[in-house]
Image (spheres, rainbow, N blue to C red):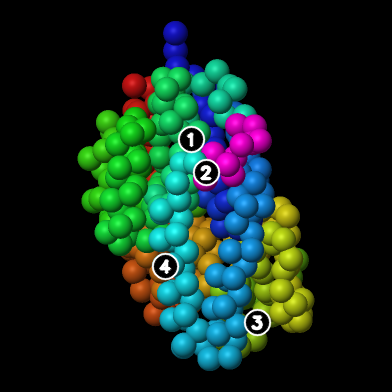
Amino acid sequence: MSKNRIVYLWTWPQNFGNAFIDLGSIQSLKEAAPDYTINQVGGLSRVLFEDRHYGQKRKIFRWIPARAIKSTPLLGERVAEINKNRFINSMLNISEIEVNKIFKNFLDLSLHFNSDFAVLSGCILDWYLIRQFGATLLNLKNKNIKIIINGGGGSSYNEKVINKVRKFLEKIKPYGFISRDEVAFKNYQDLAEYSYNGIDCGFFVNDYFTPAKLEMPKYCVFTFDRQPEPEIEVKDRLIVRTHHSHYCDPPKSYFEKPNTLISNLPEDYLNLYANAEAVYSDRVHACVVALSYGTPCKLYHKTPRALLFDRVEARGIEKELTYPDTNRIEREKKKQIKFLSDVLEG
């Protein structure tokens, strides 16, 4: 019987950048295997169960660097990095008993579809994959469902994280692995039956959604969630502000400047980024979306996740306003869809 059923696992619901990844990934699956049925499973339930367990600890890790950044930005960024590493290490050392306790009453809907493939995407190759999806992926494997990581990468590539992720991938034995940056491909490509040095799935979002033509003056978009909005010289352009972190209680600063959008619809952001003259952001996937629609952008955040821009010749994005090589992006997308189609069709 033809294998034509996919269960797609959405990941972080509290950050719209991940919605762009998931929508792009699903679009690439539809293009690679148009006759397949795709059943989608949301990620909010996992986050709520985990927040219920770790809420106070996570608030402490976020509050300390946030206060430091506000008072002394350079020192604050260093404090933020130290706290992030401490939090990652604490999550890497989490026991199976504690994970079972967190998700004791969680209904894992992904296990109740008649599926041939399970697919997930994005920044998942770290402690997050193991903790939130570990039991799910092991159960899917035990049901002989083939696991595909489509456009996967990590938020950290230190030795401890890589070793932990490799041990877990050895357990689930992915059927297909498409990386989104060279470092992820180098470290994990040998652990899947089929591997490909690919691009981030957010670059497929322009095929998912055709933006409307907005009746607005020429404008630039500022999207800053991780740091205070920097001084950026923009002449003769309206400034529109967006925020990707809409989950829980947004800070007061989100509401203090004009022309601000905080939405529950990904398409609102896509319309704004696609029609903008330029996008300035500390959000990686505000820039990914901008590039996918041909909009120049600049990233104000140094992170290993930005390695994904190297795959589309946008290496200078952290230094200057960068114009996309749309021909390169489209070529990479076509090659990735061909690989994905070959893997799915077996």
Q: How crowded is mark 1: few (under 14 residues within 10 Å), some or many (20 or more)?
A: some
For disc 4, the marked residue is: 85
Upstream in sequence: badge 3 or badge 1: 1
Q: Nearer the viewer, mark 2 or mark 4?
A: 2
How far apart marks 4 and 1 lie (CA) works out to: 24 Å
- In the rendered structure, are the residues bearing label 1 and label 2 in contact, judged by CB atoms less than 8 Å apart? yes
Rendered-image quadrant of the C terminus: top left
For disc 2, the marked residue is: 99
How far across and how far down the image is residue 212, in percent? 69, 55
Is residue 154 positioned above or below 95 on the image?
Answer: below
How far across and how far down the image is residue 222, in percent? 61, 75
Q: Which of 98 and 108 is in front in this view?
A: 98
User: Which residue occupies 50% across, 33% down?
Assistant: 136
As drawn, the label of residue 237 is 3
As drawn, the label of residue 135 is 1
User: Which residue occupies 62% across, 67% down?
Assistant: 59
Helix, strand or loop at label 3? It is loop
Q: In this view, does 47 lie to the left or right of 21?
A: right
Helix, strand or loop at label 4? It is helix
Residue type, mark 3 in image: Arg
| Span shown in magenta | 98-108
Helix, strand or loop at label 2? It is helix
How far across and how far down the image is residue 305, in percent? 41, 62
